[in-house]
């Protein structure tokens, strides 16, 4: 991993952490933090699945340490980032990165959150507790990430998105 890639990854973590502090909205019983999901989509396209997962993990860790996130930030962010990166890597379609984020976070992570929350957080919620807010957050963030990627690809620097850094 080169220095340039690590700097970009650090910038993505900073954007996701700062964005989650300022940009959120109510989603049923929880809050939706779409910036994390937008960053997941952009990082998956720009850097690939492994760096996107590292960014999601570090973002969740910083948010937990600063008191702005919960333990659910780990499965929610990391699974979506991974699927977004894998979908883009194999199909080279930006919209599939957004679909991967929604499937990974909105479906898989929300279902995984049930036993995860019971084991680590001592709660006994059903899947219906997690699925709606995870879906709202991931869909809104994936759309935002997709819009930003399409806009960035029209710029001179952004045309390099998806290439190896």
Image: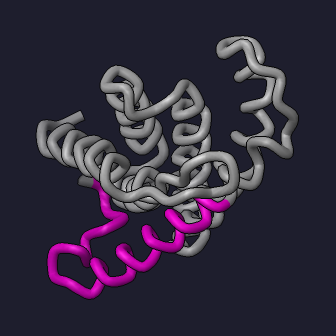
Query: Is 1 placed above or below 27 here?
Result: above
Q: Residue 95 location, x and y as percent? A: 56, 74
| Residue under the point 47% across and 52% down | 33
Q: Is residue 96 visible?
A: yes
Q: Residue 135 location, x and y as percent? A: 69, 57
Residue toward you, 24 or 80: 24
| Residue under the point 59% across and 31% down | 72
| Residue under the point 62% across and 46% down | 30
Q: Quadrant of residue 46?
A: bottom left
Is residue 28 left or right of 86 when viewed as pictured? right
Q: Is residue 104 visible?
A: no
Residue toward you, 118 or 97: 118
Is residue 14 left or right of 38 when viewed as pictured? left
Q: Is residue 144 magenta?
A: yes
Q: Is residue 86 magenta?
A: no
| Snapshot colouring | one colour
Q: Residue 25 location, x and y as percent? A: 50, 59
Residue range corresponding to the magenta coloring: 136-164
Q: Main secondary structure of the magenta part?
A: helix
Q: Residue 1 location, x and y as percent? A: 24, 34
Query: Is 129 placed above or below 46 here?
Result: above
Query: Is 156 placed above or below 133 here?
Result: below
């Amino acid at each position: 991993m080169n220095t340039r890639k690590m700097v970009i990854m650090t910038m993505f973590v900073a954007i996701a952490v700062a964005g989650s502090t300022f940009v959120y909205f109510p989603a049923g019983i929880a809050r939706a933090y779409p910036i994390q999901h937008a960053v997941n989509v952009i990082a998956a396209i720009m850097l690939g699945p492994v760096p996107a997962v590292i960014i999601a993990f570090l973002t969740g860790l910083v948010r937990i340490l600063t008191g702005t996130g919960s333990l659910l930030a780990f499965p929610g962010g990391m699974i979506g980032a991974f699927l977004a990166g894998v979908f883009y890597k194999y199909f080279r379609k930006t919209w599939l990165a957004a679909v991967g984020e929604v499937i990974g976070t909105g479906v898989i992570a929300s279902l995984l959150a049930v036993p995860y929350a019971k084991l680590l957080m001592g709660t006994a919620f059903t899947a219906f507790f997690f699925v709606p807010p995870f879906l709202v957050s991931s869909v809104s963030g994936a759309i935002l990430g997709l819009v930003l990627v399409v806009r960035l690809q029209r710029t001179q620097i952004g045309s390099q998105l998806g290439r190896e850094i």
